[in-house]
Amino acid sequence: MKLIRGRYLLVLIAACGLASTTLGMMTNVAGVFFTPMAEDFGIGRGTAALTLTIGNLSYAVGGIFSRRLVTDRSFKPMVLLGTAIMAGATAAMAAAPNIWVLYVLNVIRGAAGGVLGLVLVTVIINNWLYVAAGISNSIAMACSGVIGAVMSPVLTAIISATSWRVGYLVAAVCILALNLPAIVFPMSLGPEAMGMTPLGANAAYQGSVPPPPAGKGRRDIVLFLLLLFYGMVFAGTCALTQHFPGLSDSYGVVAAGSAMLSVAMVANSGGKLLMGVLIQRIGTRRTVQATAGCVLLGLAGLIFLRSTPALLVSAGLMGFCYSQSSLGIVMMATELYGVRRYSEIYPKLSLGTSIANALSATLIGYLYDFSGGYASTLWLFLALDAAAIVCATAAYSRK
């Protein structure tokens, strides 16, 4: 981290801002609007929550086109345009007359957010901060969680004092403010366009240096499928944390549910920072295996333990699933495909993980209705996560 200074530090700040808006302000605070919107429009909460699902799917599709739309030459105009669309659509939500208009606005906002989202953020960091890509990506992704944690109670208070429409106006202003560094700081998609070199590109680096790009053909397809399975499984596992209140209720410890969810959210941000540090020290492969193992321990704890302290510890270990489906898959794709092919591969992986996360919450609910409990769901995810770790190991064996 001591190496990140000057222009490189400004780039990291701008990347953190983009991550904070495209994930923090658009996804992590979305839940505070569901209940007041549902009450205002006279609809169910599930119908209101569908705005988030639609926005997330649109976000994933936008990420597919990010690398084609954002180049060194178009970087500033696209950031300015994307910010205007995101903030404008968010502000327009304040005047939405019905839920259908909100659905359309979420499609528009989600697509713009996808173009400026994790695909672009991680490409910027990989291009500029070569020697510190692991810790820098972890900081940017953790910022989205911090913004969500900070702004959720703020927006809740604003909505309670005024209305959910005012809340959207405040969110629009926050999007403009957080994206301002990427708009005004002197930067581009890569340092070469500004006559600079990536941080540490000429230095002896003992960390995780991306190898030459993976080969094409059948070998390349198998490698992609291994990473896709890994990302989709852990993205699906993330949806399980939203069922912690129901899980604790089924165990007869109702009060533990909200605390378990809070612990998991803390582990969400803290786990990404810890993974970033470990990646710099012991490499991506060992870090991913160790932290994915923590998720397995957390699942086992949820299956066999019933006391509140044990459930809280298990929830904390489960929080590492967020790191796997974001930072873990980003760094593995960077290492196994190389920086140059990363922007080609990651958008496809991101689309798969987004779909898996969106569908998993519904699948968990149906499994509960069918079985009358969460045991079958926990055992299923335990088996899937173990298989995903094997897939990650197999992916590195094909490097």
Image (cartoon, helix red, strand yellow):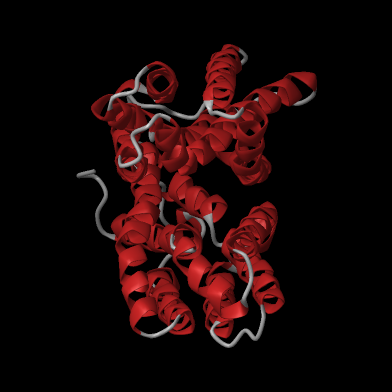
Residue 7 % position (x, y): 32, 60
Quadrant assignment, res 297: top left
Residue 256 % position (x, y): 31, 38
Q: Residue at x 62, y 84 (%)?
A: 96
Q: Is residue 245 above or below residue 44?
A: above
Residue 273 % position (x, y): 30, 40
Q: Is residue 126 above or below residue 222?
A: below
Residue closer to the observer: 56 or 176: 56
Residue closer to the observer: 21 or 373: 373
Q: Is residue 170 above or below residue 323?
A: below
Quadrant assignment, res 319: top left
Quick check: 248 left or right of 153?
A: right
| Quadrant in which the N terminus appears | top left
| Quadrant in which the C terminus appears | top right
Q: Residue at x 64, y 57 (%)?
A: 66
Looking at the image, the residue that sits furthest to the left is 2
Q: Residue at x 40, y 49 (%)?
A: 141
Residue 247 in view, yes or no: yes
Quick check: 126 left or right of 232?
A: left
Residue closer to the observer: 223 or 184: 223
Residue closer to the observer: 52 or 174: 52
Residue 223 % position (x, y): 67, 23
Residue 338 in view, yes or no: no
In this rendering, the count of numbered labels is 0
